[in-house]
């Protein structure tokens, strides 16, 4: 569904993404792994419109989406999770979710004069949707809590919840497991699997936790030095000598991750 062709992203003379070609299949949960500095986040950011590519092409269902800004991609159902911005910390979890869908009637002056009833109806529908999302993610008890007061793992769930407020087609998740305890990581994993199976979401997941990748992802793509090194099942990737070498080159921490 998303095809990336010979993508480059240079920061000055540094080639963070250096000729990456890969594709993400519709309906799959694809894992993107690779040693620190491999260019995974930069690749995400180029696809998601945060950075303009130096060169290369990104298409979705045959349509050229190279360099489109995040809000255009958002309307096409391409979403990347972001940390809850600081200014939203004092809002409740429910309000954070209700903020997501743009273009409500209440945003237009004409409607604030003439469409009060419609605004009230939309608010009610949004609130119901937000509550449904909180329940799906098993954090309905946090509806009234300020987003700044919930735990790091609960914030990750809320970030995932924001993608459920709109009709997402493909969701990019960058290290949702970082700093999250095992129990909550399982809840996040369950939510991703259910969204994939029940609602047809396609996911691309950057993650260093190999248990998490093993549970969710097929296929797995391994990047190193800005390029794709190997694609396959996690077992195939782990057995790939080039992959092992790439991890070895970056030290023990990563070697343990890939051979675990
Ligand atoms: N805005 C930037 N300006 C300059 N260099 C950058 C910028 N963003 C990323 N880089 C560099 O590009 C390289 C790739 O970084 P990136 O964050 O994409 O790697 P990664 O594979 O996601 O790594 P990690 O697993 O550690 O998060 C790194 O060497 C990084 O320092």
Image: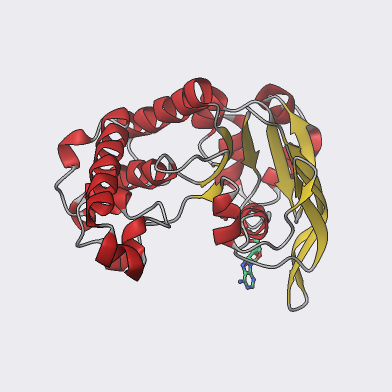
Figure coloring: secondary structure
| Quadrant the N terminus occupies | top right
At horizontal 49% and vertical 39% (from top left) the residue drawn is 167
Q: Is residue 48 above or below residue 139?
A: below
Residue, far bottom: 12
Using the image as rendered, state which of residue 16 and residue 60 is in the foreground: 60
| Quadrant the C terminus occupies | top right
Residue 95 image offset from top left, x and y in percent: 24, 52
Using the image as rendered, state which of residue 65 and residue 86 is in the foreground: 65
Residue 173 image offset from top left, x and y in percent: 52, 44
Q: Is residue 122 left or right of residue 257?
A: left
At horizontal 45% and vertical 23% (from top left) the residue drawn is 194
Q: Is residue 169 left or right of residue 68?
A: left
Q: Is residue 247 left or right of residue 189?
A: right
Ligand 1 quarter of the rendering: bottom right
Residue 150 image offset from top left, x and y in percent: 21, 49
Using the image as rendered, state which of residue 114 and residue 99 is in the foreground: 114
Using the image as rendered, state which of residue 189 and residue 143 is in the foreground: 143
Picture quadrant where residue 104 is located: bottom left
Q: Is residue 121 above or below residue 112?
A: above
Number of marks: 0
Residue 249 image offset from top left, x and y in percent: 71, 50
At horizontal 79% and vertical 62% (from top left) the residue drawn is 8
At horizontal 78% and vertical 42% (from top left) the residue drawn is 22
Residue, far front: 114
């Amino acid at each position: 569904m998303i095809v990336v062709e010979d993508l480059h992203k240079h920061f000055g003379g540094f080639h963070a993404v250096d000729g990456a070609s890969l594709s993400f299949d519709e309906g799959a949960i694809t894992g993107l792994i690779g040693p620190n500095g491999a260019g995974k986040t930069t690749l995400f950011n180029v696809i998601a419109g945060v950075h303009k590519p130096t060169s290369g092409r990104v298409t979705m269902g045959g349509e050229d989406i190279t360099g489109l800004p995040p809000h255009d991609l958002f309307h096409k159902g391409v979403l990347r999770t972001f940390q809850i911005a600081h200014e939203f910390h004092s809002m409740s979890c429910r309000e954070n979710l209700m903020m997501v869908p743009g273009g409500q009637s209440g945003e237009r002056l004409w409607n604030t004069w003439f469409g009060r009833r419609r605004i009230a109806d939309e608010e009610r529908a949004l609130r119901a949707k937000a509550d449904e999302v909180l329940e799906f993610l098993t954090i309905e008890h946090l509806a009234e809590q300020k987003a700044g007061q919930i735990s790091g793992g609960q914030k990750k769930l809320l970030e995932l919840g924001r993608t459920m407020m709109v009709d997402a087609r493909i969701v990019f998740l960058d290290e949702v497991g970082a700093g999250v305890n095992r129990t909550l990581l399982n809840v996040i994993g369950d939510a991703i699997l259910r969204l994939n199976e029940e609602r047809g979401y396609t996911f691309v997941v950057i993650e260093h936790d190999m248990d998490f990748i093993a549970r969710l992802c097929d296929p797995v793509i391994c990047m190193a030095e800005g390029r794709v090194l190997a694609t396959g099942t996690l077992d195939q990737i782990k057995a790939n000598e080039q992959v092992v070498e790439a991890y070895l080159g970056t030290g023990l921490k990563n070697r343990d991750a890939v051979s675990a």
